[in-house]
Each structure stands twice: as structure tokens, then as C-alpha cells.
Image (spheres, grey):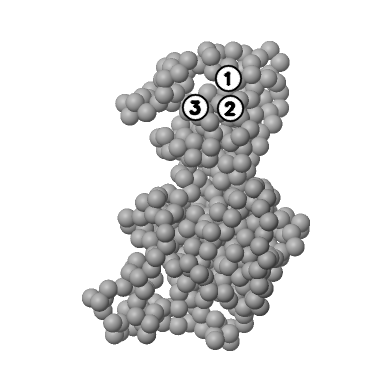
Amino acid sequence: MAETTASVRRLSSADAKRCDLYSGPTVIAPPENMKAPCDANGTATRLERARKSIDETASDRATPEVEQPDPSSTDKFALAFDIDGVLLKGGKALPESIGAMKYINGDNPPYIFVTNGGGKTEEERCIDLSRQLQMEVSPGQFICGHTPMREMAEAYQTVLVVGGEGEKCRVVAEDYGFKDVVTPGDIIKSKHDTTPFRKLTEEEYRNSRDRNFDETTIDAIFVFADSRDWAGDQQIILDLLMSKNGRLGTRSETFDEGPPIYFSHNDIVWSTSHEHSRLGMGALRTSIEALYKELTGKELTTVAFGKPHLGTFGFATRLLREWRKETYGIDQPPATVYFVGDTPESDIRGTNEYNQISDTDWFSILVKTGVYRDNKTPQYPPRKVCEDVMEAVKFAVQRELGEDQWELVEIPFWSLQRKEWTQSDPVPMNPSDLSLVGRLSK
Ligand code: G3P
Ligand code: MG
């Protein structure tokens, strides 16, 4: 495995800011004799560079020749994790997920996170995830439902962005390069009776922007994250879909002149802290299509990104591929990617279908901690069912390396959880001060 040339820095999820994620990497390591066999930060840094490299491919620059070292066993496979229902529920880490992350951090095979969730910038979401999973997660390892929408920023001049908390999705969209972003709040502020039962709070009123909608053409609608106000958002979306060329206040006579609508994913339900799955963005999509039919008599064509969309899996493949090229000088994808998910309709369906068109073996693993429950046969059957994410990573590692090649080692707990070691840190003296991680036997 090639040594990374850049020095690296551990981020603290407690106080990291957006700029920290992109500033120069440094690390304050514990003394050599106490160093943990954990290179998660190195992985994250390399993936971050890989992500940047993907962004730069548009410039079509020539790839410099690199030496091709032999891949180690862990180079041959990678892991991809769904988040809600696999690692988190209701914003809190599932107990097995922290252990699973420690397990693979011992001699880390590359891993990424592919969630349909969103509503925040990728950077902000990674800071949350770092805190929740007690480890560093870089935007270079992270794909969320609306990540592919970045590529549509150039296509439209003025867009309506729906969903998420407050102004967050407007910020995400502007960050992606969308030039002129309108929110439902802007529309309600300009005409309060647009939504008879939805009144803007003082804060919403302050944040919403003044504009003249008689002179505004909305070219496309993007549902970035789950709606916080279905009734109001449905009304505004339908007004636009039935309009003449995206002009609010107008009505098409033919109902085929409205702007296109894109959803960041199509999950009908998702897993939260509630004992039963909750309605998701796919349910809003279904309701919009049904209401449009009811109101106009016409079928509405909508587009959804996220899993199981094959484009999302293609993006994940490119991310992993670029990372291997950057890090190991190997210009080929891993032989196998294990995808661990909880929703048969998005995670398992997408993995299985992408596997049919991919040179890489995309291996689907379904866990029982989220949307899928044991009591029914999944509509899209996985290649392996596991109780939880811990069992899933153990299965993947042992299938690749065999039990005899993978050992559990004990390391000081603080080396996984703290950003730096100081002289005052205790030398671990008893087992409760130690954490177990998996490591490839040398
Ligand atoms: O809104 C989030 C959701 O529908 C599912 O997220 O992480 O399970 O893909 P995830
Ligand atoms: Mg899930």
C-alpha cells in the first residue's frame, strides 16, 4: 500500500467548521508504541482528494503515469453503507454501528456512505455523522440524495427548491451553483393567500426574499429534502405544474406547459426512531402525481434521483475508483463492493440492478434494523441477510479474507474517539479502557 505523502489531521466533530474540512491536513499522533492500527483519517483524506479529482475530470486533463504497486488484500473490496436504518435511527447511532465502524477501521478497506437523506450541505452532514458515529467522516466519502442535482445547476436559470429546514436547502442549491433559487417561503411572502392555512413564522418571513412573481419564470422544481409542510408545498408545486411555462398565477389550458419536477429520491417510507417506518419523499411524489391526475386528467412525468437510481451507484463507483487511483495507483475498481442497506426497494434493488451492468461485483446485504423486518419476504431479495451492520461487516471481511487472516486487536479507546493525544492521557491499564477493532494479520 503506497504511503500517503500528505500529513493528515484529525477533525473533532464537536467543533469542526466547514472551512476545517478543506484546510490543510495535520495530525498530532500518540507516541509510536501506543499508536492505534487505525487509518480512518488517512482514508478520509485520500477520499477527499479523490472526490476533488472527480470534480476536476471535467477539465479532461491528462492522467500522469503512475507506478502500479501490488494491491493488498483489503484493496480488493470496499464497503458502502446506507445510513438511516443501518447506522442511525432518529439521528442517533444504532449501538452496533459504532462497533462496526471500529471493526473495519483496524486495517480499513475503503468505505463510503450512500444515503437518500439530505437537507444540508454534504459538509454539514459529515460533521453530524462524525459526531454520531464517533469517527471522522469526510465529504469525500459521502453521497446524499441530492448530490447528483449538482450536475443540473447549469441547466436552469430560476428554480423552486422544496424541503428541508428553514433556508438550508436554498443554501445547498446555491452551493451547487444554481443561479436563482426560489423557495415556497418567497412565494407565500409575496402572496399570503397562496396557502390559506400556512402562515410564515417571523423568522421565515424575515428569511424569505421579496420578489415580483409576475415577472418570474420558474424553469424547474427540485424537491431537495423531505417537505416540512406537505399541504403548502403540494399547493405551490401543483400551481407551478399546471401553469403556463412556470409563471405563477397562470393556468395552462393543455396542462403540458409546466416546468419539470425532480425529487432527490423516491423512498415511500424510511426508518426513524418510531417503531414503524415513516412516510418519505416517495410518498409526496406519489401524492403529487395522483393529485395532478385528479386535477387535470393527465399523467405527470416526474424524475427521482437517489437509490435505486443507477446514476447514484455509478457516482459511487467513480468515487471509489478515483480513490484507488489516487491512493494506490491502481486504475481499476475494487473486485467487490458490499452494499449494506435496510430498504429492499432502494438499497437492494439498486445494488442488484447496478451489479448487472457493472464490472465490479456489487454484493447486496440487507439488515433487519430498519425498514425491512423479518416477517415478510423482501420484494427485492438480497444476496445476504444479516441481523445488523456489525454482522454485515464481519460477513464481508470474512468472506474476503477468511477468519484466520482477520484478527481482533485491542487499542486504547481514546485513539478512536479523541482528536489528539496529550501527555495527560492515561495509559490504558484495564480492559474497559480498550476498544476492539478488526485488523488484517500481518
Ligand atoms: O430521508 C431519508 C431517507 O428516505 C432514507 O435515508 O440513509 O436510508 O438512504 P437512507
Ligand atoms: Mg436506509
In the rendered image of this protein, does residue 347 appear above or below residue 209?
Answer: below
The answer for how far apart the CA atoms under marks 3 and 2 are is 11 Å
Secondary structure state at the residue bearing disc 1: loop
Mark 1: few, some, or many residues within 10 Å (few <14, many ≥20)? some
Side of 232 relative to 244 (left or right): left
Residue shown at 52%/28% (left/top)? 180
Identify the residue shown where x is 56% and y is 46%.
Answer: 147
Quadrant in which the N terminus is drawn: bottom right
Marks 1 and 2 in Cβ contact (< 8 Å) = yes
Where 167 falls versus 89 (above or below)? above
Residue 388 visible to an observer of this rendering: no
Q: Which residue is mark 1?
A: 217
Amino acid type of the residue that numbered disc 2 sits on in the rendered structure: Gln
How many neighbours does mark 2 have within 10 angstroms: few (below 14), some (14-19), or many (20 or more)? some
Please tell me which residue is depicted at 62% across the width and 73% down the height of the picture: 75
Real-space Cα distance between discs 1 and 2?
9 Å
Is 59 rendered above or below residue 389? above
Query: Who comes first in sequence, dot 1 or dot 2?
Result: 2
Q: Amino acid at mark 1?
A: Thr
Report if the CB atoms under discs 3 and 2 are less than 8 Å apart: no
| Left or right of residue 93, residue 431 in this image | left
Mark 2 highlights which residue?
157
Q: Position of residue 136 (x, y in %)?
A: 43, 62
Q: Label 2 CB, ligand 1: below 8 Å?
A: no
Question: Which one is earlier in the sequence, the residue at label 3 or at label 2?
Answer: 2
Q: Position of residue 408 (x, y in %)?
A: 48, 82
Residue type indicated by callout 3? Val
Circle 3 residue: 182
Q: Foreground residue, 258 or 389?
A: 258
**Where does residue 333 sit, x and y in percent of width and height?**
68, 65
